[in-house]
Amino acid sequence: MQLAEEFYCYVWQGMGNNCNSCLFTNVIRGERPHVLVDPGHIANEMGEPCFDYLVKAIEGNGFKADDIGLVINTHSHPDHCQANEVLVTRNQAVVTLSKEEEEFRTTLGAGMYSMLAMKPPRFAPLFYLKEGTLDLGAKNKISLRVFLTPGHSPGSVCLYWQENRILITGDVVFYGSIGRTDFPGGSLSQLRGSIDRLAQLDVECLVSGHSTEMGSIIKGKLDVERNFQSVKLFF
């Protein structure tokens, strides 16, 4: 679904596990001007071809997955970054995530893939995300504020598009729930601190990494505020 000019969200509709993905279109220079946040699984535990579904959805909006030049990972869990390898191999796409998350991915986080009987995706970040502003160039310049938000994963990041008051939270906070902290590198106390920081932002659209029984995207400033209040109260 389109949430703003040049910005689309693809909510996972399958039966098995996979993340929601976001696409910024025509924002960077060169032959591959699109930016994808969290490409998700190639195929999940139920054998669903998650990335193929995403490609079809992107094409349904009139864009080409082959034109994705930059991949942003909110964190390195397989349901968010496994398809990095496809985009790097097929598109020569550039990948970025936080330095803290890359250190986790190549050490303690690598055990998650073994535990899940998966091969870690092959990619190397060209640059690291860090607290501050990330400018997606070209004529329709978009500036995102990057927040380091550990708790679900040591180097998780959230992206805030202040101009449109859109917050992409990855697996930090969901509709009526929060990300798990029982994975390697998880910390409930850190997650609480991260959520407290995000709750201070002026947000009218919260885009989480997964849907819950309550829903996926939260629209409206009041509903976003109520969601933060609820998760802080119960978790």
Image (spheres, grey):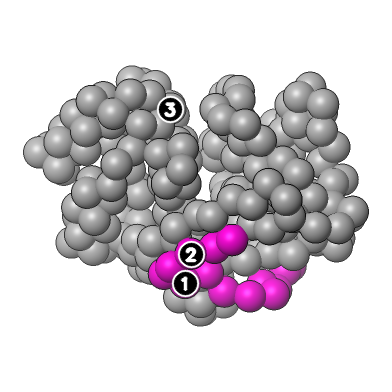
Residue at the disc numbered 1: 130
- Residue at figure coordinates x 66%, y 72% from the top left: 125
Q: Which residue is mark 2?
A: 133
Amino acid at the residue labelled 3? Ile
Q: Residue at x 84, y 52 (%)?
A: 32
Residue at position x 46%, y 37% from top? 164
For marks 1 and 3, the one nearer the N-term is: 1
Residue at image point 29% right, 41% down: 202
Q: Are marks 1 and 3 in contact (CB under 8 Å)?
A: no
- Quadrant housing residue 227: top left
Q: Which image quadrant is residue 186 in? A: bottom left
- The Cα atoms of the two marked residues, 1 and 2, are separated by 8 Å
Q: Residues within 10 Å of mark 1 (few under 14, many from 20)?
A: some
The answer to whether residue 123 is visible is: yes
Mark 2 vs 3, N-terminal side: 2
The one of 69 and 51 positioned closer to us in this rendering: 69
Tell me where residue 206 sits by quadrant.
top left
Disc 1 residue type (three-letter):
Lys
**Do residues under tags 2 and 3 come within 8 Å of each other at their CB atoms?**
no
Q: Which callout, 1 or 3, points to the residue nearer the camera?
A: 1
Q: Residue furthest front?
A: 139
Q: Residues within 10 Å of mark 3 (few under 14, many from 20)?
A: many
71 inside magenta stretch: no
- Identify the disc placed on residue 217: 3
Q: What stretch of residues is rendered in magenta?
A: 121-135
Local SS, label 1: loop
